[in-house]
Amino acid sequence: MVSAPDSTAPDYRKLHRIFAAQSAVYLGSVYGLSKSWYKNPLTNFHFRDDRQVWLQMDKAGHLFTAYQISRYTAEIYRSAGISRRQRILYGALSGFVFQTPIELLDGFSPDYGFSVSDVLANLAGSVLFAGQMLAWDELRIVPKFSGHFTGYAEMRPALLGRSGAERMLKDYNGQTYWLSVSPRSFLKGSRWPAWLCISVGYGIENMVAAEPGKSRGMGYAPYRQYYLSLDVDLTRLPIRNRFLRTMATVFNSVKIPAPAVEFAGREGIRFRPFYF
């Protein structure tokens, strides 16, 4: 699918306002994070190989976040009248750059360290957005998120969160990251509803420490979970109201609750009649 060339002139005043607002949010987020997330004073810059922590669930989170920031900012840039290619590339660059200061702060934190694998996951999220838009002019493979509370956070609240918001952010045991695809996107002549997606998910269980070895030392056996489910692409529903279309775009980052089949290695195959 190829878009027609943009015919409207860019609104540079609006573009400058977008840049200014983006910068303010960007700097405010970094400042707030530096005060709330990093409990110990920053130290000398150092690297950390954290490819194995949280069984790579944190990497899925980095990819998801970079993708969503890229998607949203590209939509905001659309209102400034810049070309299709520019808004795609600016959006993708925003998705990557927005998270870079977090990685740098990690590099100065005695509790973490600069993670090359985190940076690569950020890049993958931005590329997943830009690559699809440049190749197909539509998003056919859509990362989504679902989450629920677990009992692990009550055992280790300092690590896995105390408040509801902290638990949703820090307790990876309750998170699932999905890739939703409508077969209709690849089979144009199909009668499959364009809005109905097949979704594959990834999650983890029994992780009460960032490192699998530490979790096992505490009496837990960490394992990966893979899911197969159905989903709805809200942006493909026939919605005419402009406000509702905007809400559909916003909430399309969340996987709808639905039955799912779980594949969990030694734990076997389980049917979840209602999973989120």
Image (cartoon, rainbow, N blue to C red):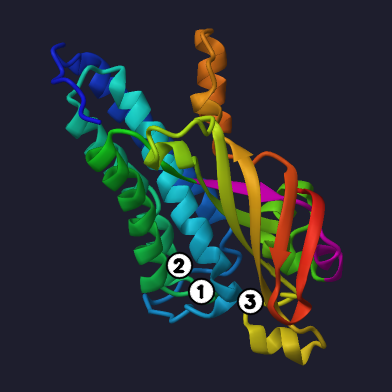
- Tell me which residue sits at (51%, 19%) in the image: 246
Q: Which mark is residue 210?
A: 3
Q: Taking 128 as reference, is 275 left or right?
A: right
Label 3 – label 1 distance at C-alpha: 11 Å
Question: Looking at the rendering, which quadrant does residue 173 occupy?
Answer: bottom right
Q: Secondary structure at mark 3?
A: loop
Which of discs 3 and 1 lies nearer the camera? The answer is: 3
| Distance of label 2 from label 3 (alpha carbons) | 15 Å
Q: Secondary structure beneath disc 2?
A: helix
Residue that appears at 20% across and 14% down: 11
How packed is label 2: few (under 14 Cα within 10 Å), some, or many (20 or more)? many
Instruction: Give how far across and how far down residue 274 sits, in percent.
Output: 81, 47
Nearest the eye: 96 or 21: 96
Instruction: Relative to 270, say whether 206 is above or below.
Output: below
Kind of residue sitting beneath label 3: Ala
User: Which label number is shown at residue 112?
Assistant: 1
Marks 2/3 in contact by CB < 8 Å: the verdict is no
Give the residue type at disc 1: Tyr
Asked whether 240 or 163 is in front, the reply is 240
Quadrant containing the N terminus in the rendered view: top left
Give the mark, 2 or 3, whose residue is nearer the N terminus: 2
* Residue at figure coordinates x 29%, y 44% from the top left: 130
Q: CA distance from mark 2 to mark 1?
A: 5 Å
- Sequence-first tag of 3 and 1: 1
Q: Position of residue 115 (x, y in %)?
A: 41, 72
Location of mark 2 (residue): 106
Secondary structure, mark 1, is loop
Q: Which residues fall within the magenta stretch?
A: 143-155
* Marks 2,1: beta carbons within 8 A: yes
Residue positioned 78% across, 50% down in the render: 163
